[in-house]
Image (tube, coloured by chain):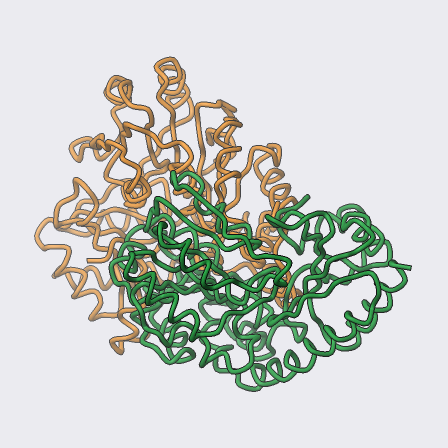
Chain colours: A orange, B green
């Protein structure tokens, strides 16, 4: 099985066409028109090296997040930032809240870190037990968590995380928090850990999901720990952000029309799709704060379910390979109403 | 001073405009029209993750080099491949033929390697002393060389490198060879070390220079050492090649018109520009096999020369920060006849 969702290329190579991809969690409004226009007008930027210091890009990201450009590191997708952070920190003992995105673990490969996993309990609908985590994380250098979490969709509020951070700061446990999906949360600007301005925290972000740009590769990190920030700048590869990603970051973060439209869509659609999924028999649906929904199939294995869905033209993420999930889990992206209706109909057919 | 050429952004930020950039070695024909057209028709690929296995891209690169896709690793520019190779190999003792590109040394940072430098002698016009290198490289795990070499432009033929490799293979010294500028050599297809198919060699390539695409970020590695190849695939970040770079690799390597036009231009222009530079007093010009020319200023420091050139609108690479070069070296890109004429005129004025 593939480690990630979104591999429609295998299907295409095998002659499958017209696949509706519900495995990767991308904004259904697609590439912002403002960016398309800007690319058309700037094709020639490809023949220059990007600004090796990415000054304009960092300023734009700073404005978007209401912070200084000096607290920002940019990278070739969020994954580059993740890998650089681990390489710079070289943590000895890491605790990863799981099930979660597989690349946290992969980024520690080759670094001789001892990795443990803090289990989110299905019995609690994968909601984090904060008191328990506070105790357990104490003996680690680094706590890794994803908020909202992929694939469970659960979200921890700022107040709780503030308390956690206050505690962990004292015992010298750093927090790496992946906020790549946070913009799908209502009023995220006030819920992000950026507001804590704590040098104990490193925040990961991407333009992949909210702006429907997984192909362009642009991620960034935010930190007030200048030691780590300088270390990363020191070991990173030059020009790792391509010219169009550099351009995108300067354009789309100012595209308030696209941003507002997306906020409105997700606010409605995540409730609607969740409620509709809940009406379906023989599945358990977990409440999500993001643009995807985790589902447990009661009477069919995920592998078989996904095969049946593909036959009907829908690619679903088999979530069984997430740590602590068994062979009954699948994850659906949330798309527009029309597509969601279609998928709901097909799910019902398949489960019949 | 900047580690690399091509940083026109600092000048732009300081209000300088209309700068002719002779510091970065990019094909003056600019972005291939075939690629521009293809990007316009495929803006929506940004909303998908690229094929995580890059099958189509590897096939295209394989066809271009007349080898199998299974010997190819693709990356976010040549630099990603370089950094991954070093991380995968973890060499203990490395010999770098210098002066050369600064990133080889940077890629070994944090890896506890002992680095030594094999000096190219100015007295020999920076031509490699192969016998001496053969002796000296014996006690190293890894020999790094750039061919043709940046910034000297010197090139080693396949026969000599074959003998070197035969010798080094026996004493277990691997060769990492950067061929990012090799396509500017006449009949390069027969001169590349690809033809040796030796598992002792790792070859680095890029689309940056020949296809005028430093902004798109696409490089690749070629090796018959499946051990290293698998190790790299194992530690690399997913989707590190962006969607447009993926597209570019499938389009431009088949653009024979652009390729032929470029070959014809460089064949003529590198001789013409070299001869014309040689006519200028008070400089020493080194014969180049690539699309740039190294020059030693006899009576003026590079820093002052570059300042004077900038005042006249030309950005030149101050090459003094290359290891073993003193404060008298500059490097010129080779562009089209009209621009080269203009630059020659301004050099003469400045040196007067």
Give x and y (percent) for residue B179. Answer: 48, 67
Q: Is residue A63 above or below residue A171?
A: below
Q: Residue at x 64, y 61 (%)?
A: A48
Residue nearest the observer in this picture, A332 or A73 = A73
Asked whether, in this view, residue B132 is left or right of residue A137, the answer is right
Residue nearest the observer in this picture, A94 or A185 = A94
Give x and y (percent) for residue A2. Answer: 23, 57
- Regarding residue A29, the answer to whether it shows in the image is no
Residue nearest the observer in this picture, A66 or B244 = B244
Q: Residue at x 72, y 62 (%)?
A: B22
Asked whether, in this view, residue A273 is left or right of residue A32, the answer is left
Q: Is residue A27 above or below residue B154?
A: above
Give x and y (percent) for residue A203. Answer: 45, 34
Give x and y (percent) for residue B276. Answer: 79, 74
Asked whether, in this view, residue B58 is left or right of residue A96, the answer is right
**Residue extending farthest left:** A299
- Regarding residue A213, the answer to whether it shows in the image is yes
Looking at the rendered image, the quarter that the C terminus of chain B falls into is bottom right
Q: Residue at x 38, y 73 (%)?
A: B194
Asked whether, in this view, residue A236 is left or right of residue A26, the answer is right
Give the quarter of the image for residue A158: top left
Looking at the rendered image, the quarter that the N terminus of chain B falls into is top right
Q: Is residue B255 above or below residue A65?
A: below
- Tally the numbered discs: 0
Q: Residue at x 42, y 51 (%)?
A: B83
């Amino acid at each position: 099985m593939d480690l990630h969702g979104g591999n429609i290329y295998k299907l295409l190579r095998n002659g499958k066409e017209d696949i509706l991809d519900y495995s990767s969690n991308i904004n259904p409004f697609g590439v912002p028109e403002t960016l398309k226009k800007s690319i058309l007008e700037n094709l020639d930027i490809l023949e220059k090296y990007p600004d090796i210091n990415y000054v304009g890009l960092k300023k734009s990201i700073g404005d978007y997040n209401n912070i200084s450009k000096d607290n920002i590191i940019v990278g070739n997708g969020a994954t580059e930032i993740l890998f650089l952070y681990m390489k710079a920190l070289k943590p000895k003992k890491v605790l990863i809240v799981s099930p979660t995105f597989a690349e946290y673990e992969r980024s520690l490969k080759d670094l001789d870190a001892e990795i443990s996993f803090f289990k989110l309990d299905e019995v609690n609908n994968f909601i984090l037990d904060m008191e328990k985590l506070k105790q357990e994380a104490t003996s680690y250098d680094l706590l890794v968590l994803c908020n909202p979490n992929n694939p469970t969709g659960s979200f921890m509020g700022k107040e709780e995380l503030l308390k956690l951070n206050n505690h962990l700061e004292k015992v010298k446990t750093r927090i790496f928090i992946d906020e790549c999906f946070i913009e799908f949360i209502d009023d995220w600007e006030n819920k992000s850990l950026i507001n804590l301005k704590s040098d104990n925290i490193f925040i990961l972000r991407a333009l992949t999901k909210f702006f429907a740009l997984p192909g362009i590769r642009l991620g960034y990190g935010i930190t007030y720990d200048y030691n780590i920030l300088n270390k990363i700048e020191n070991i990173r590869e030059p020009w790792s952000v391509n010219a169009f990603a550099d351009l995108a970051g300067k354009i789309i973060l100012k595209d308030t029309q696209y941003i507002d439209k997306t906020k409105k869509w997700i606010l409605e659609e995540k409730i609607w799709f969740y409620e509709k999924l809940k009406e379906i028999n023989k599945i358990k649906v977990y409440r999500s704060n993001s643009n995807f929904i985790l589902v447990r199939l009661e009477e069919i294995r995920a592998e078989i379910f996904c095969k049946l869905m593909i036959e009907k033209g829908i690619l679903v993420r088999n979530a069984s390979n997430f740590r602590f999930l068994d062979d009954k889990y699948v994850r659906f992206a949330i798309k527009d109403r029309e597509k969601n209706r279609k998928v709901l109909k097909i799910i019902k057919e398949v489960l019949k």
